[in-house]
Amino acid sequence: MLSFATHVRDEGLLGCWYDNLSLGTTVAHLIERYIQTDDGRAELRAWATQVAEDQFEEAISCQYEAA
């Protein structure tokens, strides 16, 4: 969750849509609420796909370097 939270923060998405902030609101609360929205689910899906593709490319690269 931390990696996704960093991503949405870097993209400027963390909390920009949330109207009910309080002193007790945590980053985890913001992320949980965000991924309950259509936009949040789409962003999570796109981010997870990119992470998986990056990890795959890194694994392939390591295999070529080892060969």
Image (cartoon, rainbow, N blue to C red):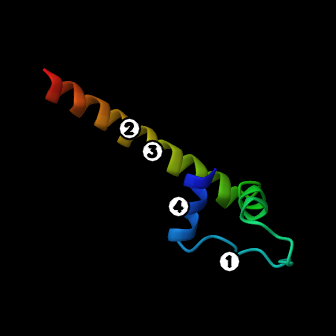
Locate residue 17 relative to residue 59 in the image: left or right.
right
Q: CA distance from mark 4 to mark 2?
A: 16 Å
Counting residues from the N terminus, which is met first, the one under dot 1 or under dot 3? 1
Residues at marks 1 and 3 touching, judged by CB atoms closer than 8 Å? no
Q: Is residue 12 above or below residue 51?
A: below
Q: Which residue is mark 4?
A: 7
Residue 43 seen: no
**SS for dot 3:** helix
Looking at numbered disc 4 in the image, what kind of residue is underneath it? His
Q: Which residue is mark 1?
A: 16
**SS for dot 1:** loop
Locate residue 24 relative to residue 60 in the image: left or right.
right
- Crowding at dot 1, Cα within 10 Å, few <14 / some 14-19 / many 20+, comes out as few
Q: CA distance from mark 4 to mark 1?
A: 14 Å
Looking at numbered disc 2 in the image, what kind of residue is underneath it? Gln
Q: Which residue is mark 2?
A: 55
Q: Which residue is mark 3?
A: 51
Counting residues from the N terminus, which is met first, the one under dot 2 or under dot 1? 1
Q: CA distance from mark 4 to mark 3?
A: 11 Å
Q: Is residue 59 above or below residue 29?
A: above
Q: Is residue 55 above or below residue 28?
A: above
Residues at marks 4 and 1 touching, judged by CB atoms closer than 8 Å? no
